[in-house]
Every structure is written in structure tokens, then in C-alpha cells.
């Protein structure tokens, strides 16, 4: 995937704000971002990793595999274990709560600044 195109999974309960902890999220809004801005592609319903209050390792791996076509993930919070698994799949993880479009813009600006130093 070229540097100007991103596929972003957003943990949101309402499709308006990034407001879910990764492990409690029931839906991920999948956006594709190109220079023109973000486009919503789909909403993926997934069973929460921490539904029972316990961290379910098998479910974590299944959910990450179902998000593995994404290059980035936005959540309001994410634990170190889940972050490590996502990063093993090549998914860059960000904790940027707020309005989805604004959170995506912040993430993209950060990514572009980082590209300057590579």
C-alpha cells in the first residue's frame, strides 16, 4: 500500500466518535483514507475481546485476523497485549479519542511527519 493510502479500523459505538476501548468494541468502522480524505467502507461487527471481563486470547487473535487488511487502528484505549498482537500483524495502533474525522486527521498528520524522518 503506498504512503498516501491508509485503511483504518476505528473503535466506535456510534460511528461519530472514537470512544471505545479496543477490547470492549463491538464494531469497527473501516475507513480508507487517500489524499481526498476518509471514506467509510464498512462496519465490521466483532465479538468483544473482553466481553466476560476476562481477556480472551483466542478471540483477540480472531478479531485481529479479521482486521488484518487494515494498516491502522484507532481506539480510545488499548492494552499493551492487544497492541503487541496488532503490531505483529503490521497494524499501527493509535489512542486518539474524539470525533472520527478529527482523530483520523491527527493520525495522518503524525504519520506524515514521521515519514520525514525515515
Image: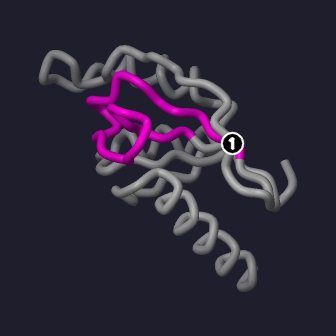
Is 65 situated above or below 38?
above
Residue at mark 1: 39
Q: Residue at x 53, y 55 (%)?
A: 101
Q: Could you tell me which quadrant the C terminus lies in?
A: bottom right
Residue lying furthest bottom: 117
| In front of the other: 44 or 23 | 44
Q: Residue at x 82, y 60 (%)?
A: 4
User: In the drawing, does residue 118 fall left or right of residue 40?
Assistant: right
Q: Quadrant of residue 91?
A: top right
Q: Secondary structure at mark 1?
A: strand
Instruction: Check residue 13 for magenta coloring.
Output: yes
**How far across and how far down the image is residue 82, in percent?**
38, 39
Q: Residue at x 57, y 21 (%)?
A: 66
Is 75 situated above or below 85?
below
**How far across and how far down the image is residue 58, in percent?**
39, 15
Give, as a single range, the part of the protein colored magenta.
Answer: 9-32
| In front of the other: 84 or 64 | 64
**How far across and how far down the image is residue 98, in percent?**
36, 57
| In front of the other: 50 or 6 | 6
Chosen colour scheme:
one colour
**How far across and how far down the image is residue 39, in percent?**
68, 42
The number of numbered badges drawn on the structure is 1
Amino acid at each position: 500500500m503506498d504512503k498516501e493510502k491508509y485503511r483504518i479500523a476505528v473503535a466506535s459505538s456510534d460511528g461519530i466518535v472514537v470512544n471505545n476501548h479496543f477490547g470492549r468494541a463491538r464494531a469497527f468502522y473501516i475507513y480508507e483514507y487517500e489524499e481526498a480524505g476518509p471514506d467509510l467502507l464498512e462496519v465490521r461487527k466483532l465479538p468483544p475481546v473482553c466481553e466476560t471481563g476476562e481477556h480472551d486470547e483466542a478471540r483477540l487473535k480472531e478479531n485481529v485476523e479479521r482486521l488484518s487488511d487494515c494498516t491502522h487502528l484507532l481506539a480510545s484505549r488499548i492494552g499493551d497485549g492487544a497492541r503487541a498482537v496488532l503490531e505483529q500483524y503490521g497494524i499501527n495502533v493509535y489512542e486518539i479519542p474524539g470525533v472520527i474525522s478529527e482523530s483520523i486527521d491527527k493520525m495522518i498528520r503524525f504519520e506524515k511527519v514521521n515519514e520525514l524522518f525515515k
